[in-house]
Image: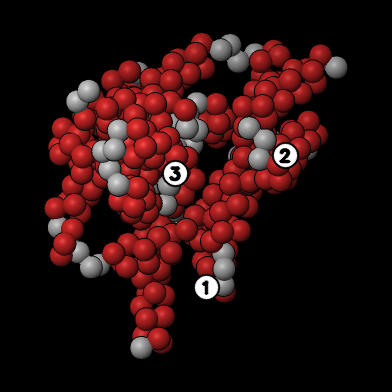
Amino acid sequence: MHKNWILFKVYLLAGTFTFSGGMAMLPVIERELVGKYHLIERDQLYEYATLSQTFPGVIALNNACFVGKKIGGTVGLIAASLGAISPAFVLMLAATIAYQMIPQEGVVLSIMAAIRAASAAFLFSAAYSLARFNLKDAPTIILAVACFLLTVLNLANAPTLIVIAGIVGVVLSRVKQVKRA
Amino acid sequence: MITIFLTFLKIGFLGFGGGYAMLSLIFQESERLGMTVQQFADLNALDGLIPGPIAINSATYLGQLYGGFWTAVAATLAVCVPSFIFVPLFLHYEEKNNDNWVLTAILDGIKPASVGLILAVALSLMLLTVFGINDIGAWSKASLDWTSLLVLGVVFFLDSKYHVNPVWLILLAGVIGGVVYYL
Protein backbone atom coordinates (compact mmCIF):
# COMPACT_ATOMS: atom_id res chain seq x y z
CA MET A 1 0.00 0.00 0.00
CA HIS A 2 1.24 3.49 -0.77
CA LYS A 3 2.35 5.43 2.32
CA ASN A 4 0.06 8.39 1.66
CA TRP A 5 -2.91 6.06 1.40
CA ILE A 6 -1.85 4.50 4.72
CA LEU A 7 -1.62 7.97 6.28
CA PHE A 8 -5.16 8.80 5.14
CA LYS A 9 -6.50 5.48 6.39
CA VAL A 10 -4.79 5.62 9.81
CA TYR A 11 -5.90 9.20 10.54
CA LEU A 12 -9.41 8.41 9.32
CA LEU A 13 -9.54 5.48 11.72
CA ALA A 14 -8.15 7.55 14.60
CA GLY A 15 -10.52 10.43 13.85
CA THR A 16 -13.56 8.17 13.79
CA PHE A 17 -12.96 6.53 17.12
CA THR A 18 -11.59 9.33 19.28
CA PHE A 19 -13.89 11.73 21.06
CA SER A 20 -12.96 15.35 21.69
CA GLY A 21 -9.82 14.96 19.56
CA GLY A 22 -6.43 16.08 20.76
CA MET A 23 -4.12 13.50 22.20
CA ALA A 24 -6.82 10.86 22.55
CA MET A 25 -6.00 9.63 19.05
CA LEU A 26 -2.30 9.11 19.76
CA PRO A 27 -2.43 5.45 20.87
CA VAL A 28 -4.16 4.46 17.61
CA ILE A 29 -1.63 6.42 15.53
CA GLU A 30 1.24 4.81 17.42
CA ARG A 31 -0.10 1.29 17.03
CA GLU A 32 -0.64 1.69 13.29
CA LEU A 33 2.17 3.95 12.04
CA VAL A 34 4.92 2.80 14.43
CA GLY A 35 3.93 -0.77 15.19
CA LYS A 36 2.26 -2.00 12.03
CA TYR A 37 3.64 0.03 9.11
CA HIS A 38 7.02 1.23 10.52
CA LEU A 39 6.65 4.60 8.82
CA ILE A 40 7.89 6.70 11.75
CA GLU A 41 9.96 6.25 14.91
CA ARG A 42 8.10 6.24 18.21
CA ASP A 43 10.24 9.08 19.67
CA GLN A 44 9.66 11.22 16.61
CA LEU A 45 5.90 10.69 16.84
CA TYR A 46 5.87 11.77 20.48
CA GLU A 47 8.03 14.79 19.76
CA TYR A 48 5.50 15.88 17.14
CA ALA A 49 2.65 15.18 19.55
CA THR A 50 4.20 17.55 22.10
CA LEU A 51 4.84 20.19 19.46
CA SER A 52 1.24 19.88 18.17
CA GLN A 53 -0.03 20.96 21.57
CA THR A 54 2.02 24.15 21.62
CA PHE A 55 0.95 25.27 18.12
CA PRO A 56 -2.21 27.30 17.50
CA GLY A 57 -5.13 25.55 15.88
CA VAL A 58 -6.62 22.10 16.18
CA ILE A 59 -4.19 19.80 18.04
CA ALA A 60 -5.20 16.57 16.27
CA LEU A 61 -4.82 18.31 12.91
CA ASN A 62 -1.42 19.79 13.85
CA ASN A 63 -0.32 16.26 14.65
CA ALA A 64 -1.63 14.96 11.31
CA CYS A 65 0.21 17.77 9.49
CA PHE A 66 3.54 17.07 11.23
CA VAL A 67 3.44 13.32 10.72
CA GLY A 68 1.96 13.55 7.21
CA LYS A 69 4.54 16.07 6.05
CA LYS A 70 7.42 14.05 7.52
CA ILE A 71 6.32 10.76 5.98
CA GLY A 72 4.87 11.85 2.65
CA GLY A 73 5.73 15.52 2.04
CA THR A 74 2.97 17.89 1.01
CA VAL A 75 0.80 15.11 -0.41
CA GLY A 76 1.23 13.20 2.85
CA LEU A 77 0.21 16.29 4.81
CA ILE A 78 -2.97 16.63 2.75
CA ALA A 79 -3.74 12.90 3.02
CA ALA A 80 -3.32 12.79 6.81
CA SER A 81 -5.26 16.05 7.28
CA LEU A 82 -8.19 14.86 5.17
CA GLY A 83 -8.23 11.66 7.19
CA ALA A 84 -8.17 13.55 10.48
CA ILE A 85 -10.88 16.08 9.56
CA SER A 86 -13.41 14.16 7.50
CA PRO A 87 -14.96 11.87 10.16
CA ALA A 88 -15.70 14.85 12.43
CA PHE A 89 -17.03 16.89 9.51
CA VAL A 90 -19.28 14.17 8.06
CA LEU A 91 -20.67 12.97 11.40
CA MET A 92 -21.22 16.47 12.76
CA LEU A 93 -22.90 17.58 9.52
CA ALA A 94 -25.31 14.63 9.74
CA ALA A 95 -25.94 15.33 13.43
CA THR A 96 -26.61 19.02 12.80
CA ILE A 97 -29.04 18.27 9.97
CA ALA A 98 -30.86 15.81 12.24
CA TYR A 99 -30.83 18.41 15.01
CA GLN A 100 -32.38 21.02 12.73
CA MET A 101 -35.26 18.63 12.02
CA ILE A 102 -36.13 17.99 15.69
CA PRO A 103 -39.39 19.75 16.54
CA GLN A 104 -38.72 21.98 19.57
CA GLU A 105 -41.98 21.49 21.46
CA GLY A 106 -43.67 19.35 24.10
CA VAL A 107 -41.62 16.56 25.61
CA VAL A 108 -38.69 17.27 23.27
CA LEU A 109 -38.33 20.70 24.84
CA SER A 110 -38.17 19.15 28.30
CA ILE A 111 -35.57 16.60 27.17
CA MET A 112 -33.48 19.31 25.50
CA ALA A 113 -33.63 21.48 28.62
CA ALA A 114 -32.19 18.63 30.69
CA ILE A 115 -29.50 17.91 28.11
CA ARG A 116 -28.53 21.60 28.14
CA ALA A 117 -28.11 21.39 31.91
CA ALA A 118 -25.86 18.36 31.35
CA SER A 119 -23.96 20.40 28.78
CA ALA A 120 -23.34 23.09 31.41
CA ALA A 121 -22.10 20.37 33.78
CA PHE A 122 -19.56 19.17 31.17
CA LEU A 123 -18.09 22.66 31.03
CA PHE A 124 -17.83 22.94 34.81
CA SER A 125 -16.15 19.58 34.82
CA ALA A 126 -13.73 20.65 32.05
CA ALA A 127 -12.90 23.84 33.97
CA TYR A 128 -12.31 21.78 37.10
CA SER A 129 -9.91 19.34 35.46
CA LEU A 130 -8.09 22.13 33.57
CA ALA A 131 -7.74 23.98 36.88
CA ARG A 132 -6.27 20.94 38.61
CA PHE A 133 -3.55 20.60 36.00
CA ASN A 134 -2.80 24.24 35.27
CA LEU A 135 -3.30 26.32 38.40
CA LYS A 136 -0.07 25.67 40.25
CA ASP A 137 0.98 28.98 41.80
CA ALA A 138 -0.21 32.50 42.59
CA PRO A 139 0.30 34.00 39.07
CA THR A 140 -1.68 31.23 37.35
CA ILE A 141 -4.53 31.46 39.89
CA ILE A 142 -4.65 35.26 39.55
CA LEU A 143 -4.70 34.92 35.75
CA ALA A 144 -7.60 32.45 35.87
CA VAL A 145 -9.65 34.49 38.35
CA ALA A 146 -9.00 37.74 36.44
CA CYS A 147 -10.11 36.18 33.13
CA PHE A 148 -13.24 34.79 34.77
CA LEU A 149 -14.24 38.08 36.38
CA LEU A 150 -13.44 40.25 33.35
CA THR A 151 -15.56 37.96 31.17
CA VAL A 152 -18.51 37.72 33.57
CA LEU A 153 -18.53 41.48 34.13
CA ASN A 154 -18.32 42.02 30.36
CA LEU A 155 -15.16 44.11 30.66
CA ALA A 156 -13.04 42.23 28.11
CA ASN A 157 -13.64 39.69 25.37
CA ALA A 158 -11.99 36.30 24.94
CA PRO A 159 -9.62 37.19 22.03
CA THR A 160 -8.20 40.14 23.99
CA LEU A 161 -7.76 38.08 27.15
CA ILE A 162 -6.07 35.26 25.24
CA VAL A 163 -3.56 37.63 23.65
CA ILE A 164 -2.85 39.28 27.02
CA ALA A 165 -2.51 35.89 28.73
CA GLY A 166 -0.02 34.80 26.06
CA ILE A 167 2.06 37.93 26.67
CA VAL A 168 1.87 37.43 30.45
CA GLY A 169 3.09 33.84 29.91
CA VAL A 170 6.12 35.07 27.97
CA VAL A 171 6.92 37.75 30.56
CA LEU A 172 6.63 35.29 33.47
CA SER A 173 8.85 32.80 31.69
CA ARG A 174 11.44 35.54 31.01
CA VAL A 175 11.36 36.59 34.70
CA LYS A 176 12.01 32.99 35.74
CA GLN A 177 14.92 32.73 33.31
CA VAL A 178 16.49 35.93 34.64
CA LYS A 179 16.06 34.78 38.25
CA ARG A 180 17.79 31.49 37.48
CA ALA A 181 20.69 33.20 35.70
CA MET B 1 -20.46 32.88 4.63
CA ILE B 2 -17.42 35.18 4.48
CA THR B 3 -18.14 36.38 8.03
CA ILE B 4 -18.27 32.80 9.29
CA PHE B 5 -15.07 31.93 7.39
CA LEU B 6 -13.23 34.91 8.90
CA THR B 7 -14.62 34.17 12.37
CA PHE B 8 -13.25 30.64 12.31
CA LEU B 9 -9.97 31.81 10.85
CA LYS B 10 -9.61 34.07 13.89
CA ILE B 11 -10.62 31.23 16.24
CA GLY B 12 -7.98 29.00 14.64
CA PHE B 13 -5.16 31.50 14.98
CA LEU B 14 -6.02 32.37 18.59
CA GLY B 15 -6.83 28.78 19.45
CA PHE B 16 -3.89 27.74 21.58
CA GLY B 17 -4.20 24.83 23.95
CA GLY B 18 -6.87 22.67 22.37
CA GLY B 19 -10.61 22.20 22.39
CA TYR B 20 -11.82 23.51 25.72
CA ALA B 21 -9.47 26.48 25.60
CA MET B 22 -10.98 27.32 22.19
CA LEU B 23 -14.55 26.86 23.36
CA SER B 24 -14.83 30.24 25.08
CA LEU B 25 -13.62 31.90 21.87
CA ILE B 26 -16.15 29.92 19.85
CA PHE B 27 -18.88 30.87 22.34
CA GLN B 28 -18.23 34.62 22.19
CA GLU B 29 -17.47 34.84 18.50
CA SER B 30 -20.56 32.86 17.49
CA GLU B 31 -22.78 34.93 19.74
CA ARG B 32 -21.86 37.77 17.41
CA LEU B 33 -23.02 35.61 14.48
CA GLY B 34 -26.42 35.31 16.15
CA MET B 35 -26.05 32.00 17.94
CA THR B 36 -28.16 31.66 21.09
CA VAL B 37 -26.91 30.22 24.38
CA GLN B 38 -29.35 27.32 23.81
CA GLN B 39 -27.75 26.50 20.46
CA PHE B 40 -24.33 26.63 22.07
CA ALA B 41 -25.44 24.29 24.85
CA ASP B 42 -26.74 21.89 22.20
CA LEU B 43 -23.45 22.15 20.29
CA ASN B 44 -21.55 21.25 23.44
CA ALA B 45 -23.83 18.25 23.99
CA LEU B 46 -23.33 17.13 20.37
CA ASP B 47 -19.56 17.40 20.96
CA GLY B 48 -19.98 14.72 23.57
CA LEU B 49 -21.83 12.46 21.15
CA ILE B 50 -19.80 12.95 17.96
CA PRO B 51 -16.11 12.00 17.69
CA GLY B 52 -13.60 14.56 16.52
CA PRO B 53 -11.91 17.79 17.61
CA ILE B 54 -14.21 20.35 19.26
CA ALA B 55 -13.14 23.16 16.91
CA ILE B 56 -13.93 21.11 13.79
CA ASN B 57 -17.27 19.99 15.22
CA SER B 58 -18.17 23.58 16.13
CA ALA B 59 -17.19 24.95 12.71
CA THR B 60 -19.28 22.32 10.93
CA TYR B 61 -22.27 22.86 13.25
CA LEU B 62 -22.31 26.64 12.99
CA GLY B 63 -21.64 26.61 9.26
CA GLN B 64 -24.52 24.23 8.64
CA LEU B 65 -26.82 26.16 10.99
CA TYR B 66 -26.11 29.59 9.52
CA GLY B 67 -25.55 28.93 5.84
CA GLY B 68 -25.84 25.26 4.94
CA PHE B 69 -23.40 22.75 3.50
CA TRP B 70 -20.87 25.01 1.76
CA THR B 71 -20.67 27.37 4.71
CA ALA B 72 -19.96 24.32 6.88
CA VAL B 73 -17.13 23.37 4.51
CA ALA B 74 -15.76 26.92 4.53
CA ALA B 75 -15.86 27.22 8.34
CA THR B 76 -14.18 23.84 8.79
CA LEU B 77 -11.40 24.72 6.34
CA ALA B 78 -10.93 28.12 8.00
CA VAL B 79 -10.25 26.60 11.41
CA CYS B 80 -7.66 24.29 9.76
CA VAL B 81 -5.67 27.09 8.08
CA PRO B 82 -3.23 27.76 10.98
CA SER B 83 -2.10 24.12 11.01
CA PHE B 84 -1.52 24.19 7.23
CA ILE B 85 0.61 27.33 7.57
CA PHE B 86 2.57 26.86 10.80
CA VAL B 87 3.45 23.17 10.65
CA PRO B 88 5.17 23.21 7.22
CA LEU B 89 6.87 26.51 8.13
CA PHE B 90 8.20 25.03 11.36
CA LEU B 91 9.44 21.86 9.66
CA HIS B 92 11.13 23.98 6.99
CA TYR B 93 13.10 25.98 9.56
CA GLU B 94 13.45 23.17 12.06
CA GLU B 95 17.24 23.23 12.36
CA LYS B 96 17.43 26.96 12.94
CA ASN B 97 14.56 27.07 15.38
CA ASN B 98 15.52 27.52 19.00
CA ASP B 99 12.62 29.76 19.91
CA ASN B 100 10.36 26.99 21.05
CA TRP B 101 10.37 28.37 24.59
CA VAL B 102 8.25 31.29 23.35
CA LEU B 103 5.46 28.96 22.23
CA THR B 104 5.66 27.04 25.50
CA ALA B 105 5.59 30.30 27.48
CA ILE B 106 2.57 31.59 25.54
CA LEU B 107 0.79 28.35 26.33
CA ASP B 108 1.77 28.62 30.01
CA GLY B 109 -0.12 31.92 30.10
CA ILE B 110 -3.11 30.80 28.04
CA LYS B 111 -3.80 27.53 29.89
CA PRO B 112 -4.63 29.19 33.25
CA ALA B 113 -6.54 31.95 31.42
CA SER B 114 -8.65 29.33 29.68
CA VAL B 115 -9.70 27.95 33.07
CA GLY B 116 -11.30 31.32 33.87
CA LEU B 117 -12.73 31.71 30.37
CA ILE B 118 -14.33 28.27 30.28
CA LEU B 119 -15.73 28.77 33.78
CA ALA B 120 -17.41 31.96 32.55
CA VAL B 121 -19.01 30.03 29.67
CA ALA B 122 -20.12 27.31 32.10
CA LEU B 123 -21.71 30.01 34.28
CA SER B 124 -23.59 31.44 31.26
CA LEU B 125 -24.99 28.00 30.51
CA MET B 126 -25.93 27.47 34.14
CA LEU B 127 -27.69 30.85 34.33
CA LEU B 128 -29.71 29.90 31.27
CA THR B 129 -30.57 26.31 32.16
CA VAL B 130 -30.99 26.53 35.93
CA PHE B 131 -32.17 30.12 36.38
CA GLY B 132 -33.70 30.89 32.99
CA ILE B 133 -31.81 34.16 32.47
CA ASN B 134 -29.34 35.22 29.78
CA ASP B 135 -26.88 37.16 31.90
CA ILE B 136 -26.12 37.93 35.50
CA GLY B 137 -27.62 41.42 35.20
CA ALA B 138 -31.10 39.90 34.86
CA TRP B 139 -30.77 38.25 38.28
CA SER B 140 -34.05 39.73 39.60
CA LYS B 141 -35.96 37.77 36.91
CA ALA B 142 -34.32 34.46 37.79
CA SER B 143 -36.49 31.46 38.58
CA LEU B 144 -34.99 28.25 39.83
CA ASP B 145 -35.50 25.10 37.74
CA TRP B 146 -35.01 22.18 40.14
CA THR B 147 -34.79 19.52 37.42
CA SER B 148 -31.96 21.33 35.63
CA LEU B 149 -30.14 21.95 38.90
CA LEU B 150 -30.39 18.25 39.76
CA VAL B 151 -29.20 17.17 36.28
CA LEU B 152 -26.32 19.65 36.41
CA GLY B 153 -25.20 18.45 39.83
CA VAL B 154 -25.45 14.75 39.07
CA VAL B 155 -23.76 14.99 35.66
CA PHE B 156 -20.94 17.13 37.07
CA PHE B 157 -20.38 14.61 39.85
CA LEU B 158 -20.40 11.56 37.57
CA ASP B 159 -18.22 13.26 34.96
CA SER B 160 -15.56 14.81 37.17
CA LYS B 161 -15.36 12.04 39.74
CA TYR B 162 -16.00 8.85 37.75
CA HIS B 163 -15.37 9.98 34.15
CA VAL B 164 -18.56 8.31 32.95
CA ASN B 165 -18.84 8.32 29.13
CA PRO B 166 -20.62 11.57 28.09
CA VAL B 167 -22.91 9.56 25.78
CA TRP B 168 -24.46 7.84 28.83
CA LEU B 169 -24.68 11.10 30.74
CA ILE B 170 -26.52 12.83 27.89
CA LEU B 171 -28.84 9.83 27.65
CA LEU B 172 -29.44 10.00 31.42
CA ALA B 173 -30.21 13.73 31.22
CA GLY B 174 -32.59 13.12 28.32
CA VAL B 175 -34.44 10.40 30.23
CA ILE B 176 -34.78 12.64 33.31
CA GLY B 177 -36.08 15.48 31.12
CA GLY B 178 -38.59 13.14 29.47
CA VAL B 179 -39.84 11.63 32.74
CA VAL B 180 -40.24 15.04 34.39
CA TYR B 181 -42.43 16.19 31.48
CA TYR B 182 -44.99 13.45 32.18
CA LEU B 183 -44.99 13.82 35.97
Q: Residue at x 63, y 46 (%)?
A: A124
Secondary structure state at the residue bearing disc 3: helix
Q: Considering only vertical position in the picture, is B65 above or below A137?
A: above
Pointer 3: what residue? A23
Which label is found at residue A139? 1
Graded by Cα atoms within 10 Å as few (under 14), some (14 to 19) or many (20 or more), the crowding at tag 1 reads: some
Graded by Cα atoms within 10 Å as few (under 14), some (14 to 19) or many (20 or more), the crowding at tag 3 reads: some
**Residue A151 at x, y percent in the picture:** 52, 55
Residue A88 visible in the current orientation: no
Q: Residue at x 78, y 36 (%)?
A: B150
**Residue B39 at x, y percent in the picture:** 53, 29
Q: Amino acid at mark 3?
A: Met
User: Is A1 displayed left or right of B146 in the figure?
Assistant: left
Mark toward the start of the polypeptide (1 vs 3): 3
Q: Considering only vertical position in the picture, is A136 above or below B168?
A: below
Graded by Cα atoms within 10 Å as few (under 14), some (14 to 19) or many (20 or more), the crowding at tag 2 reads: some
Which label is found at residue B171? none
User: Is A171 displayed left or right of B171 in the figure?
Assistant: left
In terms of image quadrants, where is residue B124? Answer: top right
Residue A162 visible in the current orientation: yes
The chain carrying label 3 is A
Q: In terms of depth relative to the viewer, which is nearer, B69 or A64?
A: A64
**Pointers 2 and 3 in contact (C-beta within 8 Å):** no
Quarter the C terminus of chain A occupies? bottom left
Q: Considering only vertical position in the picture, is A109 above or below B134?
A: above
Secondary structure state at the residue bearing disc 2: helix
Q: Do pointers 2 and 3 mark residues of a single chain?
A: no
- For the residues labelled 1 and 2, the Cα–Cα distance comes to 31 Å
Pointer 2: what residue? B158
The chain carrying label 1 is A
The chain carrying label 2 is B
**Pointers 1 and 2 in contact (C-beta within 8 Å):** no
